[in-house]
Image (cartoon, helix red, strand yellow):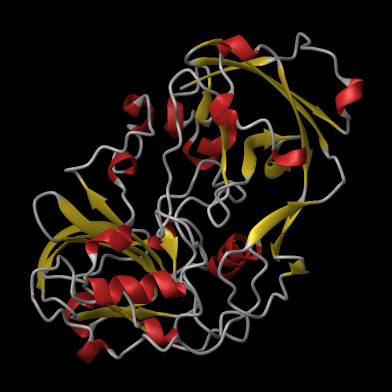
């Protein structure tokens, strides 16, 4: 799967074809420096004037079964050739410590993952930077390689550019997200439990620009990835005996993942995300959008969800797929793909069985095919 196809899969879940122009609050890179100098980041992560929108953290798409720990910054010409080059900035002073040449994942892909260490505890992470600056490219590893470096960068320095879309997130080891009840399950990606809303790290002027560009209209505006509540259905689960988030096979690590969570754009809407639904990763809404998984406990007993498709609406008007609309809400379709049964046997042990192509009235209880998931 090449880079362009992967990003299109991710963005099509929000049914976005293109968005043009910029908001009246946007300014050029020269004009976004904080006046008081006390804010953490005084520069945006990319040239926002060329970004169509920001997709918040927390999406669940394809084999990204649990909420995604980074944002996406697609270009205004994302579906029109992707010829635009968008500059990537170091949002604050720091040191580039790691460069990965992403060609190891796909022979067609030829871009970079960059880590900028701003303090001992806080770093910025960019993925899918197509071209590195002249200063940095001389240190880049060969295709498929990874290297530790020590390259100082100044706040606002252009470190490269991209076409199409780039991923961005902040890692802050001062923070442990409370919505991961078993941090040990994430040892394969240890930064994940330290990944807060990036918007909170920018000065107020830039933060306003970022919020204006973002599809999400509720706090935390930059997205949320941790939804676990101990003793409740909501959040991330892993098939028992499959090594938590890391899985048993790196190339298919997501197969044992399960998330019963909330849509990243409309956080009032429940999404069930499977690592393996008829042997494929799939995501569905829940018929009637209830019961809320945050309210389901051991005492709830057997819980039955009918799985349906969904779309985004602005009031009663279906999203036109062309304009940036704030406050989008999900409405479910009536089609039912199947049924899933959940039952909490213990606070951190969940019994699960999927019944594809069935309706609620067709399913009365578990069979010998039920599986156990843990935190």
Q: How many marks?
A: 0
Q: Is residue 151 above or below residue 56?
A: below
Position of 131 compared to 262: left or right?
A: left
Q: Is residue 58 above or below residue 125?
A: above
Say which of 179 and 126 sits in front. Answer: 179
Give the percent coordinates (x, y) of residue 166. Answer: 42, 69
Position of 72 compared to 206: left or right?
A: right
Give the percent coordinates (x, y) of residue 36. Answer: 8, 77
Picture quadrant of residue 258: top right
Judge whether residue 256 can be spotted in this image.
no
Judge whether residue 324 can be spotted in this image.
yes
Position of 75 compared to 89: left or right?
A: right
Q: Is residue 6 above or below residue 256?
A: below
Name which residue lies at 34% across and 42% down: 192
Name which residue lies at 56% across and 25% down: 295
Picture quadrant of residue 302: top right
Give the percent coordinates (x, y) of residue 97. Answer: 16, 59
Q: Is residue 72 above or below residue 75?
A: above
Name which residue lies at 34% across and 83% down: 47
Say which of 113 and 180 sits in front. Answer: 180
| Quadrant occupied by the N terminus | bottom right
Say which of 94 and 205 sits in front. Answer: 205
Give the percent coordinates (x, y) of residue 50. Answer: 43, 86
Name which residue lies at 66% across and 77% down: 17
The extreme front residue here reads 315
């Amino acid at each position: 799967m090449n880079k362009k196809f992967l990003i299109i899969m991710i963005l099509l879940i929000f049914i976005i074809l293109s968005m043009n122009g910029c908001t009246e609050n946007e300014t050029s890179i020269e004009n976004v420096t904080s006046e008081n100098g006390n804010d953490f980041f005084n520069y945006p992560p990319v040239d926002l004037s060329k970004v169509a929108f920001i997709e918040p953290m927390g999406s669940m798409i394809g084999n990204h079964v649990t909420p995604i720990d980074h944002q996406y910054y697609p270009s205004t010409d994302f579906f029109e050739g992707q010829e635009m080059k968008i500059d990537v900035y170091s949002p604050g002073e720091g040191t580039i410590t790691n460069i990965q040449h992403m060609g190891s994942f796909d022979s067609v892909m030829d871009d970079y993952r960059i880590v900028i260490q701003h303090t001992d505890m806080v770093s910025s992470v960019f993925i899918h930077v197509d071209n590195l600056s002249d200063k940095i490219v001389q240190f880049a590893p060969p295709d498929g390689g990874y290297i530790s470096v020590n390259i100082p960068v100044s706040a606002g320095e252009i470190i490269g550019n991209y076409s199409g879309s780039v991923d961005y997130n902040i890692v802050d080891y001062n923070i442990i997200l409370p919505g991961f009840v078993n941090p040990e399950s994430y040892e394969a990606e240890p930064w994940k439990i330290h990944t807060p809303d990036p918007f909170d790290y920018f000065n107020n002027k830039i933060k306003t620009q970022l919020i204006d560009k973002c599809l999400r209209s509720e706090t935390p505006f930059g997205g949320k990835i941790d939804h676990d509540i101990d003793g409740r259905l909501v959040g991330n689960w892993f098939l028992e005996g499959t090594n938590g988030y890391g899985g048993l096979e790196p190339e298919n690590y997501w197969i044992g993942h399960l998330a019963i969570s909330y849509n990243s754009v409309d956080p009032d809407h429940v999404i069930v995300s499977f690592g393996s639904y008829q042997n494929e990763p799939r995501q569905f809404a829940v018929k009637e959008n209830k019961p809320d998984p945050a309210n389901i406990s051991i005492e709830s007993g057997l819980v039955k969800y009918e799985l349906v498709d969904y779309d985004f609406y602005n009031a009663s008007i279906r999203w036109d797929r062309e304009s940036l609309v704030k406050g989008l809400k999900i409405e479910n379709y009536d089609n039912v793909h199947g049924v899933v049964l959940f039952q909490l046997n213990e606070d951190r042990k969940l019994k699960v069985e999927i019944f594809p192509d069935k309706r609620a009235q067709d399913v009365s209880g578990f069979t010998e095919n039920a599986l156990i998931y843990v935190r």
